[in-house]
Image: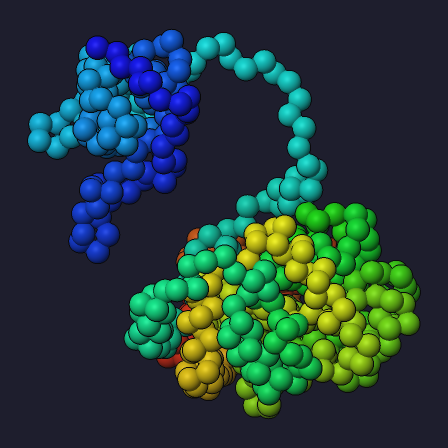
């Protein structure tokens, strides 16, 4: 019997099927089959089409379109009828029909599932799309040009794995997870405001903690009102670029430099102007000669990425003077300055700025762990409102829980303790790497830059080119990055960027011996 309920016309759209993946998913030994989500189908009670037909067609279409996947569990007919607020009869009829036609299969005592093999399909379990209707007519599919520029780069074998020499791999064994998880539990118990929409700039106590830390440890001149929480430096760069740049605005970038910055500036449509880096940092005079009226200069003055140079005081002052005279902005990416071995951390460039020209960007990816996806921007006071509106338009506000946890982690002293411990651990690893290079590869590799951070860059003196070495190394499970890939223009220097965060000091000599075999094998 078809039931068309005499209710106000309405379309019932139930939960999004895309959230329905935990079918029969095991998590920590707890089976979550009970969490079957009702797939989205539209039911129109005012339609002349019987309810049974609407349900049958809704499910069939979802299966054929592969929104529902082979093997995916469906809700019970009783549960679905209750969810749709209709009698169970049309649901039973629709499911019977789908079972009869082979779209569904029922397993005794275990419920109803999308069939493993669809009608007319030899193997629906494969990833082949199900042909439906006429083939699409060939036509132009016009999209933005910006991503195509990024796609042109060949796949990079040195980013395909984790292990010895992989850049940006931190040591996670020393992270105080028991402390972290107790703070997570504390905030989950408290709930309350953590579940609501928040401030586009982030969670108040987090911004206070970060401002206090930056004033003390990094000589940054800031108040909490200038701090914006972001999902790492990458988002900080994107928001900054959207506030500061128009399409084709010229931007100085370091040559060689950080690819993440280059990529995000590319997709926002900036015109990149590579400015050489020498042993004093960014060559400001060369930048002025190439593009005196750049809107922004992107720099890593504490520990230049990738060369490891520290920008000298005179270059810093020259850069600030240029920005002030020209009405330009400086983005200071201070990504790993907490880790400096053999001398105190270098004070920020932002702290020298008397004209509010510097947008200071920092991250917890290095000092804690990258999956946290948490960083911050220190915004010049007169730009705060602009950053706020752009941020709100992008993702409204940052997730609150991790900010709350980290605010306590900092306030209760765990953060400072962790930095102290890791400075020692990474310092030993860097020392072990530099020594092993001197012992085993001293004739081929010359270590550049100051002892800081979690990577070391070494220039290649002769022999095969850096890309060739990196490709061969990746085959051996050694993840060295070719220095030449950090250049945008011609004249790239040959060398290797070697991460040491993820390899113990004891394991370093053996890893370098394996690298020597690759470097010296012709
Ligand atoms: C120069 C530079 N900036 C920033 C980052 C960190 O980026 P994020 O905070 O987005 O993880 C890295 C990571 O390798 C880096 O090398």
Q: How is the image coloured?
A: rainbow
User: Closest to the observer: 351 or 441?
Assistant: 351
What residue is drawn where x is 82% and y is 53%?
249
Viewport quadrant of the N terminus? top left
Q: Quadrant of residue 200?
A: bottom right
Give the answer, above or below, for where 307 lies relative to 491. Answer: below
- What percent of the width, then of the height, locates residue 216? 60, 87
Give the answer, above or below, for where 250 lies relative to 74. Answer: below
User: Closest to the observer: 347 or 489?
Assistant: 347
- What percent of the width, then of the height, locates residue 9? 42, 21
What residue is drawn where x is 62% and y is 42%?
151
Q: Is residue 466 left or right of residue 270?
A: left
Q: Is residue 78 left or right of residue 336?
A: left
- What percent of the width, then of the height, locates residue 57? 34, 15
What residue is drawn where x is 47% and y is 55%?
474
User: Closest to the observer: 225 or 521?
Assistant: 225
Q: How many numbered markers are drawn? A: 0
Please say whether residue 443 is visible from this viewpoint. no
What residue is drawn where x is 24% and y is 42%?
35
Q: Quadrant of residue 78?
A: top left
Viewport quadrant of the C terminus? bottom right
- What percent of the width, then of the height, locates residue 250? 82, 55
Q: Is residue 492 left or right of residue 432?
A: right
């Amino acid at each position: 019997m078809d039931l068309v309920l005499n209710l106000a016309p309405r379309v019932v759209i139930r939960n999004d099927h895309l959230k329905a993946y935990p079918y029969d998913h095991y998590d920590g030994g707890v089976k979550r089959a009970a969490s079957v989500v009702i797939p989205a189908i539209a039911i129109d009670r005012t339609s002349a089409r019987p309810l049974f037909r609407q349900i049958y067609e809704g499910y069939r279409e979802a299966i054929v379109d592969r929104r529902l996947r082979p093997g995916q569990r469906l809700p019970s007919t009783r549960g679905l009828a209750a969810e749709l607020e209709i009698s169970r009869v049309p649901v039973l009829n629709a499911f019977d029909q789908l079972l009869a036609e082979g779209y569904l299969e029922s397993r005794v005592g275990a419920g109803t599932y999308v069939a493993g093999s669809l009608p007319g399909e030899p193997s629906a379990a494969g990833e082949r799309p199900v042909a439906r209707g006429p083939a699409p007519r060939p036509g132009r599919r016009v999209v933005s040009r910006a991503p195509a520029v990024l796609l042109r780069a060949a796949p990079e074998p040195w980013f395909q794995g984790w292990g010895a020499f992989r850049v940006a791999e931190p040591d996670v064994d020393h992270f105080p997870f028991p402390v972290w998880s107790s703070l997570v539990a504390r905030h989950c118990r408290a709930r309350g405001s953590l579940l609501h929409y928040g401030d586009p700039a982030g969670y108040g106590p987090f911004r206070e903690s970060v401002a206090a830390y930056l004033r003390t440890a990094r000589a940054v001149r800031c108040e909490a009102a200038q701090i914006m929480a972001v999902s790492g430096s990458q988002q900080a760069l994107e928001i900054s670029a959207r506030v500061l740049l128009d399409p084709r605005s010229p931007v100085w970038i370091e040559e060689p430099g950080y690819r993440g910055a280059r990529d995000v500036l590319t997709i926002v449509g900036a015109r990149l102007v590579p400015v050489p880096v020498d042993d004093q940092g960014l060559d400001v005079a060369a930048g002025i000669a190439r593009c005196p009226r750049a809107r922004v200069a992107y720099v890593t003055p504490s520990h230049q990425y990738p060369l490891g140079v520290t920008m000298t005081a005179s270059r810093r002052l020259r850069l600030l003077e240029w920005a002030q005279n020209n009405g330009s902005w400086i983005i200071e990416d201070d990504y790993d300055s907490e880790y400096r071995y053999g001398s105190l951390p270098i004070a920020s460039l932002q702290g020298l700025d008397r004209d509010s020209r510097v947008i200071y960007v920092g991250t917890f990816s290095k000092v804690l762990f990258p999956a946290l996806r948490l960083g911050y921007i220190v915004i010049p006071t007169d730009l705060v409102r602009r950053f706020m509106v752009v941020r709100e338009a992008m993702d409204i506000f940052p997730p609150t829980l991790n900010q709350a946890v980290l605010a306590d982690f900092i306030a209760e002293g765990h953060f400072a303790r962790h930095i102290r411990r890791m400075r020692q651990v990474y310092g030993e690893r860097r020392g072990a790497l530099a020594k092993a290079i001197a012992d085993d590869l001293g004739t081929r590799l010359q270590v550049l830059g100051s002892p800081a951070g979690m990577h070391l860059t070494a220039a290649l003196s002769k022999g095969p080119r850096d890309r060739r070495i990196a490709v061969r190394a990746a085959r051996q499970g050694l993840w060295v990055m070719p220095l030449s890939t950090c250049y945008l223009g011609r004249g790239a220097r040959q060398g290797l960027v070697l991460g040491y965060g993820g390899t113990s000091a004891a394991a370093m000599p053996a890893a370098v011996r394996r690298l020597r075999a690759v470097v010296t094998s012709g």
